[in-house]
Image (cartoon, helix red, strand yellow):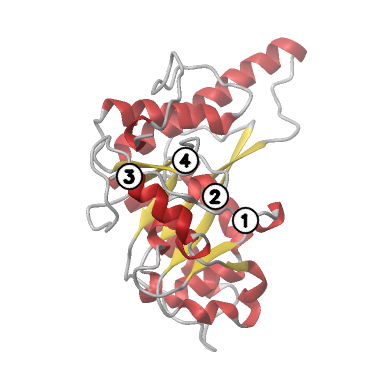
Amino acid sequence: QNSNNAIQMSTDNAGSSDSPPVGDPRESIVNVVDGLFRRNTQPSLHCLACDAWGTPAFYVAGSNFKQIGHGNKRVPSVTIVAPNNPSDLGKVFVYHSGIGTGKTVDLAASAYSRNAALTMMVKTSDDIAKPSDDDGEGEHAKRVRAGLKKILAATFKEHSGTMKPVLDHVHSMDDTMEAQKAKDDGDGDASEKQTINFVLAFDDAWDVPNLLQGIAKNHAALGDDMGAFLASYCDEEGEAKPLKHFKLKLLFSVAGRGLVFLSFGSSRANCLHLEPSAAQNPRAMYESLRNNM
């Protein structure tokens, strides 16, 4: 099956932030992104078909992103190998195999392998300072948070044509659930928030080792903090209301040569070191690409 026809997601309100929430909030967001993709108005929004059923993984990427894919043309279907252990999905995914082994394809497919709504691909050389004996308590952690917020804010701005409708839809779902709960029991407070994952994926990440080590050491708390920052449209002083029924969480994936340092020290247990899918199942990848030439 040609990859351009492999992804068949349908919704009457695809691409509309006014569409009501469905049972799975991630699926509802993916439908919105699919609508944007089909209209071909966002040149930085791309899609991979990740298995024999054409399951989509949407991602935004800047002009310096080296993977193919333009307009609403799907990259040929690829076979992505997702981790089997659900407890691993929250770790930092690390790909540090050689050049040309398919690391970037796996990064782009992170929404598929990590059960996320969307992946934000970034490439930066703007590292933070190393931890120092002169640092005050929590000073290095503040640098990590500031560095991530700077990257997220720049990513949101660059891809606002995709990111703003997505966040509008999240807030619309939250408002709808708040109104429904208030109608049902007169109390709009949510007892437990549903988590919606987004992925921040660093390609060619060897230029920012200090930032990566800081992420790996405290990835869970950083994922919550950066998810809340994203939910604010990356503007903590803005007028976006806090979400009552959903929690956005940022997951981290990184790829590049020389990232073996993440295999040692306190960050080791927080990282999942993976072979690219092409290396794990080269025959399936070859057949998939050959059939879509």
N-term mark: 4 or 1: 1
Q: Which residue corresponds to the image point at 39% horizontal and 45% vertical from the top-left? A: 59
Q: Nearer the viewer, residue 246 or 50?
A: 50
Q: Which residue is mark 4?
A: 232
Rendered location of residue 273, percent (x, y): 57, 69
Residue that numbered label 1 is attached to: 83
Say what amino acid the circle numbered 2 marks.
Ser
Which residue occupies 57% across, 59% down?
222
* First in residue order: circle 1 vs circle 2: 1
Crowd around label 4: few <14 · some 14–19 · many ≥20 (10 Å): some
Measured in 3D between alpha carbons, the distance from the residue under mark 2 to the one under mark 3, in whole angstroms, is 17 Å
Q: Amino acid at mark 4?
A: Ser
* Three-letter code for the amino acid on which mark 1 is drawn: Pro
How far apart are the two marked residues, 4 and 1, measured between alpha carbons?
Answer: 31 Å
Measured Cα–Cα span from mark 1 to mark 2: 7 Å
**Residue at numbered disc 3:** 75
Q: Sequence-wise, which precedes: disc 3 or disc 1?
A: 3
Contact? badges 1 and 2 (CB < 8 Å): yes
Q: Position of residue 184 (x, y in %)?
A: 74, 11
Q: Which residue is mark 2?
A: 113
Q: Which residue is located at x 27 percent, y 51 percent?
A: 68
Mark 4 or 1: in front is: 1
Label 1 environment density (alpha carbons within 10 Å; few <14, some 14–19, many ≥20): few
Mark 2 and mark 4 lie on one chain; the one further toward the N terminus is: 2
Q: Secondary structure at mark 2?
A: helix
* Viewer-proximal residue among 163 and 65: 65
For the residue pair 50 and 72, the one nearer the viewer reads as: 50
Q: Which amino acid does the dot numbered 3 rest on?
A: Val
Residue 86 at what x, y percent from top left? 69, 52
Tell me if label 2 and label 3 are in contact, CB under 8 Å: no
| 168 versus 205 height, above or below | above
